[in-house]
Image (cartoon, rainbow, N blue to C red):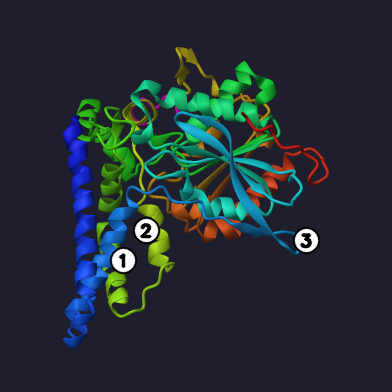
Amino acid sequence: MKGMMSYDLMETIRNTNEWMGASARAMASYPVWGLTPHPMFKLLSAWGRVTERSFARMVIKPDWGIRSIPGVDGRDHTVEVETLLDKPFGSLVHFKVQGRAQMARRVLLVAPMSGHYATLLRSTVASLLPDCEVYVTDWHNARDIPVSEGKFDIEDYTLYLVDFMRFLGPDINVIAVCQPAPLTLAATAYLAEEDPAAQPRTLTLIGGPIDPDAAATEVTDFGRRVTMGQLEQLVIQRVGFKYKGAGRMVYPGLMQLASFISMNMEKHADAFQKKIVAEAKGEGSERDHHNVFYDEYLSVMDMTAEFYLSTVERIFKGLEIAHNRFTIEGKRVDIGKITSVAVHTVEGANDDISAPGQCVAALGLCTGLPEAKKAQHLEPGAGHYGIFAGSSWRKNIRPLILDFIDANAPEAPKGSRKPPVRAA
């Protein structure tokens, strides 16, 4: 499975399905078939449109699509996405709101690197922008990173977060969503010991596997069943000849997508069946709920093999964060060193990926932090997606986080802070 041929085979299958969809759409859309008004042609055309679009999305990085936001002055302000730090495996981007004074609340959203792009947090960013200066970690697709750039594992990931936090300064409020929660906690602890002045003001961890053993899910069960040797043999491949990262060992996004879909196969099959019927009836639209969701869901990126394998081995199997044994370059990172950063955990009662108990375990590890600087929230009825992008986020969790940030902020006039200097 580690050869380029297997990686290129997956890309060939994807390409073939995209071509089949395009061919069916074109063939069934000829005007001449109007002389034979049979529903088969409309269904075939609809199937082709949906199939072509779906398989094409798998290799396209989505756009943020946040053009403007309403301001307190009653005007719409345009939004520009600017890169502040650009590193080989990820960038720090800022959503600059034109014509608006710098907001006092400054938030760094640490996006997951678990198969999807950072744009998965688009609605989260959009909901925070009216009240905050928002910065996001924009991780790069491993298939596009030349082998000459070297490795990128969970230690490198943690040090990237350290660099981003240092750059943004100590008045930043960090929000880590899902996968990066344990490594963001480690990065904060690293700064607490190595550079206390650069620590963030607050740290909010949303639905992350701090202690995967605290509550079993399909994800943790899979981690226990499969050995590292089996995992490496089954899912790791070399990037094919088509991309800049040719030869790099990766966990392919297409394989991750197949895993995502298999977890809810019946639900996805039903969604696509309904979409095809709607298209055949002429009831589909470019930005309907199906397209909005699946344009993002189907857009996947490769992860470096060393990042994926070290995550499974050290976070899930070895429980290095859960047992406070995580090391960077051989030196232990003691989470107990966090003494001044206010820490908040958020979990969803119905989260089937990072079940309740996994994330709140972070508070128990912060042995040096006063109880007054700890907070936790369990959102009733919320699943994994809902706690950072759904109605639960908009109605309950977002206001709680903003209140938590404000409660731990010094008194300062709104808009008084200066933005960080853009890196050359």
- Residue 321 part of the magenta segment: yes
The vertical placement of 53 against 198, above or below, is: below
The nearer-to-camera label among 1 and 2 is 2
Quarter-of-image position of residue 36 = bottom left
Q: Nearer the viewer, residue 376 or 131?
A: 131
- What type of secondary structure mainly makes up the magenta span? loop
Q: Callout 2: 10 Å neighbours few (<14), some, many (20+)? A: some
Res. 323 visible in picture: no
User: Could you tell me the amino acid type at mark 2?
Assistant: Tyr
Disc 3 to disc 2, how far (Cα)?
35 Å
User: Could you tell me the amino acid type at mark 1?
Assistant: Ala
Position of 283 with respect to 409 (left or right) is left
Q: Position of residue 312 (x, y in %)?
A: 34, 31
Residue that badge 1 annotates: 271
Residue that badge 3 annotates: 73
Residue that badge 2 annotates: 294
Of callouts 3 and 2, which one flags the residue occurring earlier in the amino acid sequence?
3
Position of 362 with respect to 225 (left or right) is right
Q: Quadrant of the N terminus?
A: top left
The vertical placement of 360 against 64, above or below, is: above
Q: Quadrant of the C terminus?
A: top right
Q: Position of residue 280 (x, y in %)?
A: 28, 77
Q: Nearer the viewer, residue 163 or 99?
A: 99
